[in-house]
Amino acid sequence: MHPQRINDTIIMKKSRFYLLGIFATASISVCAQTTKRVFVYSPGEHAGLHVAQFTHNGWQELGQLCSSDYGTWGAEKRMYHPSVARAADGTWRLVFQVNDSSPLFAAAYSRNLVTWRPQDYPVMSTPQCLKPVVFANDNGTFDIYYQTKTGDKRWVSASGNFRQFSKDQKSLIDQAAWTRDTATIAGKLHEGNTFDITAQELSTITSHFQQLQADARLSSERMHDDAKNSLQPHQPVTATLHVSNSEKTISDKLIGIFFEDISYAADGGLYAELIQNRDFEYNAKDRREWNATTAWHSASPIDISTQHPLSSNNPHYAVIAADTLWNEGWDGIAVEAGHKYNFSMYVLADGQKQNFTIQLIGTDGTILASSKLKTQGTDWQQYTCVLSTKKSCTKAHLAIIPQKSVRVGLDMISLFPQETFMNRPNGLRRDLAQVIADLKPKFVRFPGGCMSHGQGLDNIYHWNHTVGPLQDRKPDFNIWGYHQTRGLGFFEYFQFCEDIGAEPLPVLAAGVPCQNSAANAQGIGGQQCGIPMDQMPAYIQELLDLIEWANGDPATSKWAKLRADAGHPAPFNLKYIGIGNEDIIGTVFEERYEMICKAIRQKYPEIKICGTVGPFHAPSADYVEGWDFTKRHPELQYMVDEHYYESTGWFMHHRNYYDGYDRTMPKVYLGEYAASTNVKRPNIETALAEALYLTDVERNGDVVEMTSYAPMLAKDKHHNWDPDMIYFSNTEVRPTPAYHVQRMFSVYGGDKYVSTDIQIAPELKHRVGVSLVRHSATGRRYLKLVNALPVELTIKANGLTIPADSKTEEFSGQPTDQTLEMKQGVAGPNALTLPPYTFRVIEL
């Protein structure tokens, strides 16, 4: 249609639409038997889209239908001036203004008002898109009008599926198009859209909110409250366990780990480098107050140069003469008496001789270790020495002391303990890596979640920036607010997987950045329209190159040769690759994800692709759309990644979550999950809730392929997120109760699930967990028992004999306990009697 013709038509439609509002009373009286009137509106910019029902008492609020998913958390996620239209087929369309500075608006689709497809954000030609309104056309398309700050009115056409949007054009539409219905709800007048819907449609909406309320009540249950909860038993409880001979095959990779560089998990954490800002590449992108000299100190201002860099990827270096240069490390440098530390640095001497004394100095000024370096040359050259410590110190610092007044450049200043995990050069912190290895994880997902797809397009994680010589790796800022040296890169991740016997599962962006990205220079936030389509072939090739790097033949592949040159000529035998991380499953994502998957499937059909279905469980929009897309394209992915962080009550009351999953569809990877309470720390309560849930995940191990608790690591004083599985400082590693649950399910895992049924009072069943698995290679069976009740639980077993000498491992405690003592023993006559709040494993 011609735009001007559409303008005329839309005004007539708009007039008819508002006649419904004028004659609301008459309409309700005539149609009371067949239709119900609802009002769709937003009560405030942070409140999202709501719906109210007209009753004999006036308008009554029903609940929130959806909310804004645009831009950064906190600062944005706002909804202004929502406009809703209904298509002839009964489906719904929503548009709203996201802010007053971005050249886009939000657009969403719903079949029933309750479940909305993830939002798209079509970009317009103007710097602002204010007060968008949407109208349905008779031909199934939609017209969208918006205003600019200068008062211009513009028009956009949208396809029936609300995924394609035309270029915007100037419009002469009358101002009446922005006239809104009004309704008084809870004493306050609101603007919105009024609709007549069927009683069945209203029932769907009200049932949805009733279900959410019921679910919220169940999810609020806390073990912490058991003492004052009259519904909980106060006397010992008896249950009966029935064990059959029926078995089914389940995943042998059910328990793994997810490593994300969050809370200083890599630099300053698992990566054993003891020098902070060794490359002098810290900058304000990392953190506003940071610069190239952060963590470095000297009596005189430190001269930073870029004139003759060691590497184009690391252009900054320090120039010093007579003054001592010292580094504070990561909250200090922890050293142990009698240990050796490898020091290295690159020096640009410009033909002059300069000698250095390298020292580790304690907090009281004591020299803990000292060594000499002589340097001379005309270009950058690496020099090394060994520092042997005489005393231990938790907060030492490194001093580089010039012996002459000769100006030289310094870069890539490094200090590593000689004793890294598996004694690898450029290796991992031994104690922390060993605690992770003790989990016996079947796989490792890396290098991150949100960090993988990054803060905006420019911060998407590129694996090929993290391999090769350290000085040539390209550092970048971390979405969690600090710096990535990339010293812990893809080679080191793959090496670690090999060292601990775990499958590598690298996860990389699906052509879009984190949906919470800040706005770019054009004012476009969130997914920022994704990598431009003309650049997608190059990005796809980058992902294909990763597979070639990991698995290729060095004799025929330049990428495989790069791996061999790093010390690993044999292939890493990569089997899995993850594409995307809890993204908005909108059009921008789906188009790019499909392109990537098709390219990988075509060139490497043996690689198992793991997709994503967003950051929340059912019934979230991304989850629904993600699974809809997966079911339309089951050939593209082997499994999809689900994420959810929930209350202990949620985990206790949703243990049947995977019972109804279609076994013919792609598998599930529960890639991020954790139970939490208001204290946001793992304790006995959260651990038992997770153990209960995992007994049923094992039962559904034929559809759930992998699981990993998240986040795994958090350094003291640098938490980006709580709770976490392992907390650590420079000298301590503190596994939490959640860690021990993960370890027990991993160490005592199997590939066959033995059918069991436990009979107990229905109101207590969600507090008791049982799982029996068999490891077919060893023949061993493992019985897991969880008692999350405040009283002793005795289980009578039918069909199961427990030898008296069966090994056991368990923990017990109070719900609020944040530490626990693991106990090992033998079964004995009371093997099936569990104290309150206990998780026990019996090896049969």
Image (cartoon, grey):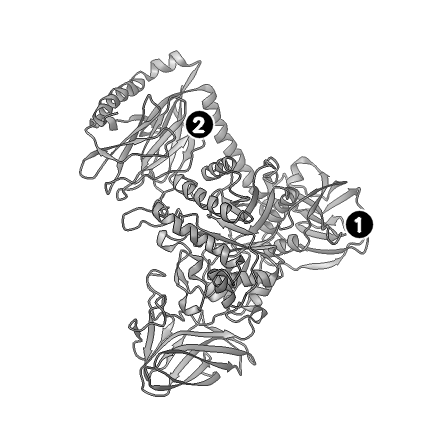
Q: Position of residue 788 (x, y in %)?
A: 65, 46
Q: Quadrant of residue 114?
A: top left
Mark 1 neighbour density, 10 Å: few (under 14) some (14–19) many (20 or more): some
Residue designated by label 1: 802
Which quarter of the image is occupied by the N terminus? top left
- The residues bearing labels 1 and 2 have C-alpha atoms spaced at a distance of 54 Å
Q: Is residue 676 visible?
A: no
> For the residue marked with disc 1, what is the amino acid?
Ile
Q: Position of residue 690 (x, y in %)?
A: 60, 48
233 to the left or right of 286: right
Residue designated by label 2: 112
Q: Position of residue 387 (x, y in %)?
A: 50, 81
Mark 2 neighbour density, 10 Å: few (under 14) some (14–19) many (20 or more): some
Q: Quadrant of residue 649?
A: top right
On screen, residue 576 above or below 190: below
Tell me the SS state at disc 2: loop
Q: Earlier in the sequence, mark 1 or mark 2?
A: 2
* Depth check, front residue: 559 or 18: 559
Q: Quadrant of residue 185?
A: top left
On screen, residue 509 above or below 10: below
> For the residue marked with disc 2, what is the amino acid?
Asn
Residue occupying the point 26% across, 23% down: 10
Q: Residue furthest top?
A: 30
Q: Nearer the viewer, mark 1 or mark 2?
A: 2
Tell me the SS state at disc 1: loop
On screen, residue 12 above or below 214: above
